[in-house]
Image: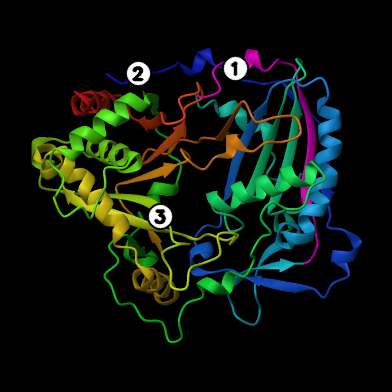
Amino acid sequence: MATSYQESSSLLLQDLKVTIKEASLVFPSQETLTHERKSMFLSNVDQVLNFDVQTVHFFRPNKDFPPEIVSEMLGKALVRAMDVYEFLAGRLRVNPSSGRLDVDCNGAGAGFVTAASEYTLEELGDLVYPNPAFAKLVTSQLQSLPKDNQPLFAFQVTSFKCGGFSMGISTNHTTFDGLSFKTFLANLASLLSEKPLSTPPCNDRTLLKARSPPRVTFPHHELVQLQDSETTTTVFEATSEHLDFNIFKLSSQQILRLKEKASESLSSTGCVRATGFNVVTALVWRCKALSFVEEEDLEKESTILYAVDIRGRLDPQLPSSYTGNAVLTAYAKAKRKALLEEPFGRIVEMVGEGANRITDEYARSAIDWGEMYKGFPHGEVLVSSWWKLGFAEVEYPWGKPKYCCPVVYHRKDIVLLFPDIDGDSKGVYVLAALPAEEMAKFQNWFEDTLS
């Protein structure tokens, strides 16, 4: 049985007692600012991701690196980082000549905030549990700036009474996907250690430019036009209804057993492997689709979405250092009845087939679809995986983070995958947020699939 735990929000710290000490802007070096001002093209993949992503990175006390020294070091390192990540000091705008959203690399600066909490790191409790109060550890809006001049990137260092601290980072999703953000963190750590960049970034977003003329050569069931559906962005939007949070911990041994279970009924063609991601995603899909099923719903179709990195799938391949959003939404769809009755290996196969579908031509077709129709990914459930991005593996001068996590908001149709905090590098936490009745069914199906 998977370890599952729910925690009443009343047991969480409602107020981290955070006080902002200083909020300012950090600018690129004068040498960078004197360069000719330019704009950065944003691909169609970037265009639909115009929202902030907030992450918090917690660090244990280190007597050689108290928070005030860390803040000073980070401020200087960010100046150097923006010399190569010039767009981080820019602003989003609609380009007057193209009518497209792009980044005006105007050197207007990134946000930098120092703050202090009246609690120790230990008093925050279980860092894995999604505490809404963690939002106080991140700044995305600077009060001193108007709404139309907010930075794309803001950093907040919050000290705790024990000497530990957190780095709260807010980035507009147009700036990075998960992999390129990990590369940015690794580069920042190199600069902090007075070393050269570990991976010089490739900022050329035109590598994912639509073809001219655009050619849509595949059906794209994972995408929907804005005007076709009033519920287009449901997956990405927060809900006001009460949701129960539940975290299911899958150990590496349980994931291995899921792989073995899948292998019993996988096709002999060998086109799909029972990887950790495939089996966990198949498990989530089955549980979510059946969590609110009445008998008459079994004939309805369920669609699961999940991100696939396309850097190595294009011809020619994208540089591994590409900074933009080089991910496309893969999908799998099936009737709920099939998710109830088919052997687990077949569900895993459908998930794997969704990723295999994304070839160079499919990716170009999806990008061209965005050029022609201006739409969003849409499905019944989205699996957002932070499992193997490796943020907690970045080695800063003061050590690796104790834990890293996004700030989590109420999203009923997004299931998050997090790495295990307890040292089981192949284990995973599955975070779901559902109304109470659906959560009870989700948990029952979770345990049923594992049995």
1 vs 3, front mark: 3
Image disc number at residue 308: 3
In percent of width and height, residue 277 lies at 35, 41
**Residue range highlighted in magenta:** 106-128
Q: Is residue 125 magenta?
A: yes
Decide which of tag 1 and tag 3 comes sooner along the chain: 1
Element type at mark 1? loop
The crowding category of the residue bearing disc 2, from other C-alpha atoms within 10 Å (few below 14, some 14 to 19, many at least 20), is few
Element type at mark 2? strand
Q: CA distance from mark 1 to mark 3?
A: 36 Å
Q: Which residue appears at 40% of the width and 61% of the height?
A: 376
The front one of 421 and 131 is 421
Element type at mark 3? strand
In percent of width and height, residue 310 lies at 44, 61
- Dots 1 and 3: beta carbons under 8 Å? no
Disc 2 marks a residue whose amino acid type is Thr
Answer above or below: position of 10 versus 99: above
Locate the C terminus and report the quarter of the image it occupies. Answer: top left
Residue that numbered label 1 is attached to: 13
Decide which of tag 2 and tag 3 comes sooner along the chain: 2
Q: Quadrant of residue 160?
A: top right
Image disc number at residue 3: 2
Image disc number at residue 412: none
Q: Is residue 202 magenta?
A: no
